Amino acid sequence: MPTNAFHIVDVFATATYAGNQLAVFEDAHSLTDDQMAALAKEMNYSETTFIEGGNPDDGFDVRIFTPGGEIPFAGHPTLGTAAVLREHFDAGDEVTLNLGVGPIPVEVRHENDDDVYWMTQNTPEFGDELDHETLAEVLSLDASDLDTDWPVQVVSTGLPAVMIPVRNRDALARIEVGLPAYRAFYDDVGVENLFPFCPDPRDEANDFAARMFAPGHGVPEDPATGSANGCFAGYLARHQYFGDREIEVTVEQGYEMGRPSHLSLEAEDEGDKIAVRVGGCVEFVAEGNLV
């Protein structure tokens, strides 16, 4: 039986036992694909990562699994794994993770006595603009709850998500994904991640409140989603949400789940490409070994 060491961390956390939980397994080269998938189901977090090997010069080979299977990229697993590599593998303040979407660099910035982990995501790709009424039905909202001043749009920095503008936090709180409508939407569009947002945060220090739903990945709701927020950063810059091609904002997520999370976003739209960075804090919670 494998006896791999593992670590549990909270990513984008406002404190310990907040943010998005992540399990990180060492020496994953000793595990089969089936064992990794089984461990991801056993941990039952949004994602679990497996470090297969590597070094600070060439980057570290990492795989990401949800309870539903392997995915090529996700945000909070990238930052949480980078924190484990920095603290336990002497990877330093700049570390690269070799993921299914290619190399993703992570840097540590020292901000207000905190170590904040920032990843640079791939350039966003913008997909179709979708019908507001359809997404309102999927989210069990009235059509009037969506903000038609801004598009519903598929965006991807490696894992596509649907950006869904809603008018206020009351509408955000009332969302319930209707599975029949969700399945019909997925059959039509082929995107599993839904990211509703509104410019109505609880804390005036933040800019947006958001939620993220991915039942197709086995994740009914996610408390902090780095990949979708990277897509969101690109969306805000491309559509000049604040009248500017550069954005620097903070998003609160996970409050409805009792897992408050803060995600910092930066983006610059340079015309032919958009630079996207997502940052947050990582709290170490536990470590152990398989038996």
Image: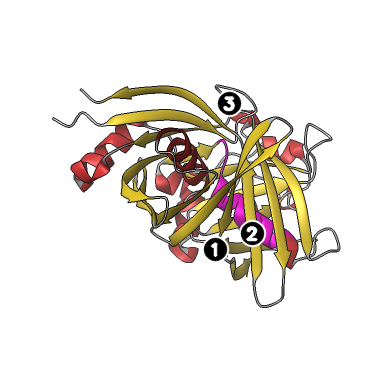
Q: Earlier in the sequence, mark 3 or mark 2?
A: 3
Which residue is painted at 73% across and 49% down in the image? 166
Q: Earlier in the sequence, mark 2 or mark 1?
A: 1
Q: Which residue in the structure is indicated by mark 3? A: 18
Q: Which mark is residue 275?
A: none
Locate the N terminus by quadrant.
top left
Look at the numbered disc 1 and give the secondary structure of its residue.
Answer: loop
* The image quarter in which residue 18 lies: top right
Which residue is painted at 45% across and 62% down in the image? 190
Here the colouring is secondary structure
Q: Nearer the viewer, mark 3 or mark 2?
A: 2
Q: Which residue in the structure is indicated by mark 2? A: 276
Q: CA distance from mark 3 to mark 1?
A: 27 Å
Q: Nearer the viewer, mark 3 or mark 1?
A: 1
Expressed as whole percent of the image width and height from the top left, the position of residue 72 reads 40, 56
Majority SS type along the magenta span: helix
Look at the numbered disc 2 and give the secondary structure of its residue.
Answer: strand
Taking 61 as reference, is 120 left or right? right
Q: Are marks 2 and 1 in contact (CB under 8 Å)?
A: yes
Of the pair 230 and 174, the residue shown nearer to us? 230
Taking 53 as reference, is 56 left or right? right
Q: Are marks 3 and 2 in contact (CB under 8 Å)?
A: no
Q: Residues within 10 Å of mark 2 (few under 14, many from 20)?
A: many
* The image quarter in which residue 168 lies: top right
The magenta segment is 223-236
Q: CA distance from mark 3 to mark 2?
A: 24 Å
Q: Which residue in the structure is indicated by mark 1? A: 122
Q: CA distance from mark 2 to mark 1?
A: 7 Å
